[in-house]
Image: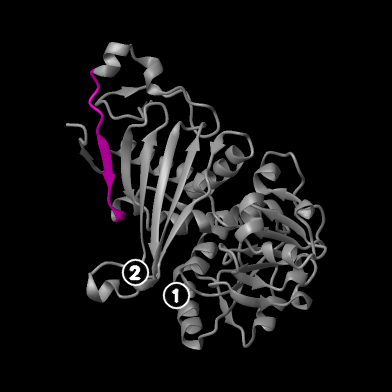
Amino acid sequence: MLRAALNTGVSVPRPCENKTLCKPLMLYLSTQEWRNITVKTLLLKKEEVRGLIRMKEVIATVEEAYQAFNSGQVIQPPYIGIDLPSHRGEIDFKLGYNQGNEMISMKASSGGFTGNPEQYGVPNGMGTVLLFDGMSGALVCVMDGSLLTGLRTGACGAVSVRALARKNASKITSIGTGNQARMQIRAIREVMKIEEIHAWDHHPETLARYKADMESELGIPVVMANSKQEAVANADILITTTRGKGSLVEAPWIKPGTHIVAIGADAPGKQELDPQIFRGAKVVVDSIAQCVEKGEIQHPINAKIMARGDIHAEIGEILLGRKPGRENDEEVTLFDATGMAIQDNTTAAKIYRNAMENKVGAFFDFLE
């Protein structure tokens, strides 16, 4: 028994979880009963969200999202971004509808407001997620979204590793040592045993802090590379999580059998990889439409090193068994991830369900 998508104060049967299509609450109620419902909205604070979901669950919700996307169950308009140069910040809005859970999600994410902590006492980047019931349009949940993006982005790397990395992969190289670099490692260790991490960062003090933090948290040895090339040479799996300000990894450094997780390029012009890396690699993306415009793959396409038709698959097609993943231990595989609203949708919906089941959060009646 799961509590219904709309809080009515009683539990009703839900006929689905994850991949099976839901029948919404209205199918269980007469018209008069529906009119008598008081719709309340669940409010979830950041620390409540933190305690409501584990990384293993996020990996499952991201896999669910990718499969839904490639099963015709998703409506996902292009996201809207507003740059505020006078404030040195930006805010993005991502909207998605998932037929599989009958939820509509909207996530607002802001970033770059460097003066916020001192001037306003708030972080320089924030996020908020709104969940609406897909049948009625009623707002069922408002939750802090500042953790969600990092979690589901980390999980996408783990999903790609499970589908595309060599089964005997054991060493990970991280180019970049920020929050997302750490999240990638936390997620990937859920799907494979990591024996060693090789890391490189522009700033030696940041690299040293990463080594100390990750060894303390995970108990995995971290080797601080003297150069990018040295770090990449040791990679079974290569993760790039920088700000995407230019090519950092050269094609000759990539050894056969490497799996590359390209995270940092998520807007036109952003770049982390030498476009020549794509020549001969098996290229998989989250969304072809998004990646050709703002993913890492925009650069080899613009340089005519490859064409849109050379993309092997969207990752949902591999998860659904429609296209093969890795086929031998020598091929270089590359996953280009730009992030999609449907990932926010499935992850937020799971957090909401967990909150309802565990009676976490507070209700607010907007329609009172």
State whether residue 277 is above or below residue 202: above
Is 42 inside the magenta-drawn segment? yes
Q: Residue at x 68, y 83 (%)?
A: 230
In terms of depth relative to the viewer, which is nearer, 323 or 231? 323
Specify the segment rendered in magenta: 36-46
Quick one: which residue is furthest to the left in this view? Answer: 368
Q: Quadrant of the C terminus?
A: top left
Quick one: which residue is furthest to the front in this view? Answer: 86
Is 124 inside the magenta-drawn segment? no
Side (left or right) of 336 relative to 153: right
Q: Nearer the viewer, mark 1 or mark 2?
A: 2
Q: Residue at x 35, y 54 (%)?
A: 50
Q: Where is residue 29 in the image (x, y as percent from the top left)?
A: 34, 14
Q: Earlier in the sequence, mark 1 or mark 2?
A: 2
In terms of depth relative to the viewer, which is nearer, 334 or 353? 334
Q: Position of residue 263 (x, y in %)?
A: 58, 63
In space, the residues marked 1 and 2 are separated at their CA atoms by 23 Å
Side (left or right) of 349 relative to 307: left
Q: Which mark is residue 66?
A: none
Tell me the amino acid under the disc marked 2. Asn
Q: Residue at x 72, y 77 (%)?
A: 250
Q: Residue at x 65, y 79 (%)?
A: 231
Side (left or right) of 141 relative to 65: left
Find disc 2 in the rendering and name its residue: 124
Tell me the amino acid under the disc marked 1. Asp
Find disc 1 in the rendering and name its residue: 213
**Crowd band around label 1 with a 10 angstrom C-alpha radius: few (<14), some (14–19), many (20+):** some
In terms of depth relative to the viewer, which is nearer, 107 or 2? 107
